[in-house]
Image (cartoon, rainbow, N blue to C red):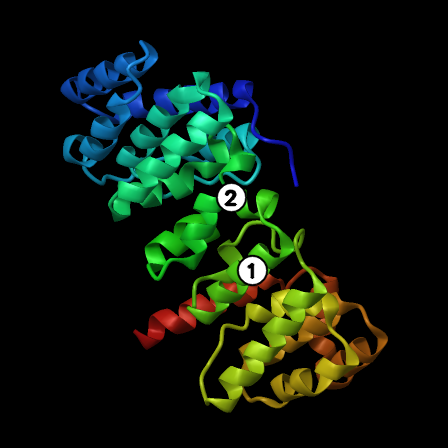
Amino acid sequence: MEKTFSIQEVKAARYFIEKKIALFITEDQYKWYIEQIEKVRSGVYRNIYFAFSKVSTVFGKRILDLNENDLIEAVIIRKGWNPSFWTVSEFIRINMLMELTFLSGEEFLNLIKNIFGTADLDERVAILKGLPIMPYQSRLTEIASEGVRSNSKLLFEAIALNNPYPCDFFTESQWNQMVLKAAFIDSPISDVFGLERRANAALSDMSIDLVHERKAAGREITPEIWRIIAPFLSIDHLDDVKALFNDNNVLNQETAALACYISNTEEAILMLLEYRPDLHTKMMDNELSWQDITNKWNKKKLQEL
């Protein structure tokens, strides 16, 4: 696990947010926002409950347009932070919470839990997205876990996708549960931050079991799941890889080739050279990657709509 986000880093994130917010809201909206922040800064932090729920009425659900330089700045502030699809309301809500750094860790945790417990769906999504830039992050795993357990796909994806918090703070068991659920409910695994860093044999085994279950039920599963399996590919998995090579679907053959190549095991490499030596050459030339597999899978799913 990485260290908890420091107060200085929280301030840097707040500066970034306030700088972006000022460009996209009206004078009246900005006046309301400053009034709420001033109340919090003056110690009336209980006002946060009213203000937090009122934000969407004042600001709506507009996506805050961020350019490439903005996203680079965000990553410098917090590795893995990707606010590409955050709304203005989400930025406002998170900045309000980040004003509460004067609270102790326990006070902050209790306040966030109380807000989360009474929040509507949009408010909960904002909190989950904002976890990686909040103070006292190591205390907030219980809230993050609620997002993983949720039956709402919006809530689940708020914590699971484009969010570095789980990678930094989840136990192996929590991490595996989250990634496997993403595969099970067809959330894009490629958008889970830290897949390679948190790869583990237990998750690989559970993922191959899911592949078998889907196959037995005659149901498709994203080829991205092999990205999880590949680092721990064993002889026991080679029949499954062979089935992908023997499939007429080119995407499945490319998936099998990548799994073999990345596993770097002798038996898998020999299978790759036997079935698709041309793909081995492409990978050596960096012409085939998991991102290519993701792009082709996404294109296929769009065509099916």
What is the crowding at mark 1: few (fewer than 14 residues within 10 Å), some, or many (at least 20)?
A: few
The relative height of residue 144 versus residue 92 in the rendered view (above or below) is: below
Asked whether 170 or 218 is in front, the reply is: 170
Q: Is residue 19 left or right of residue 252?
A: left
Across and down, in percent, residue 55 comes to: 21, 32
Q: Quick check: can you spot residue 162?
A: no
Query: What residue is pinned by disc 1?
Result: 291
What is the crowding at mark 2: few (fewer than 14 residues within 10 Å), some, or many (at least 20)?
A: some
| Callout 2 touching callout 1 (CB < 8 Å) | no
Across and down, in percent, residue 90 comes to: 31, 36
Query: What residue is pinned by disc 2?
Result: 141
Asked whether 80 or 4 is in front, the reply is: 4
User: Looking at the image, is mark 2 or mark 1 earlier in the sequence?
Assistant: 2
Where's the N terminus, which quadrant? top right
The residue located at (49%, 39%) in the rendering is 140
Across and down, in percent, residue 278 comes to: 71, 76
Tag 2 secondary structure: helix
Q: Is residue 157 left or right of residue 203?
A: left
The residue located at (38%, 34%) in the rendering is 112
Across and down, in percent, residue 250 comes to: 56, 80
Q: Which mark is residue 254?
A: none
Q: Quadrant of residue 254 in the image?
A: bottom right
Q: Quick check: can you spot residue 51?
A: yes
The residue located at (58%, 56%) in the rendering is 175
Q: Is residue 47 left or right of residue 289?
A: left
- Residue farthest to the top? 42
Tag 1 secondary structure: helix
Q: Quadrant of residue 83 in the image?
A: top left
Where's the C terminus, which quadrant? bottom left
C-alpha gap between disc 2 and disc 1: 29 Å
Asked whether 161 or 38 is in front, the reply is: 38
The relative height of residue 257 versus residue 18 in the rendered view (above or below) is: below
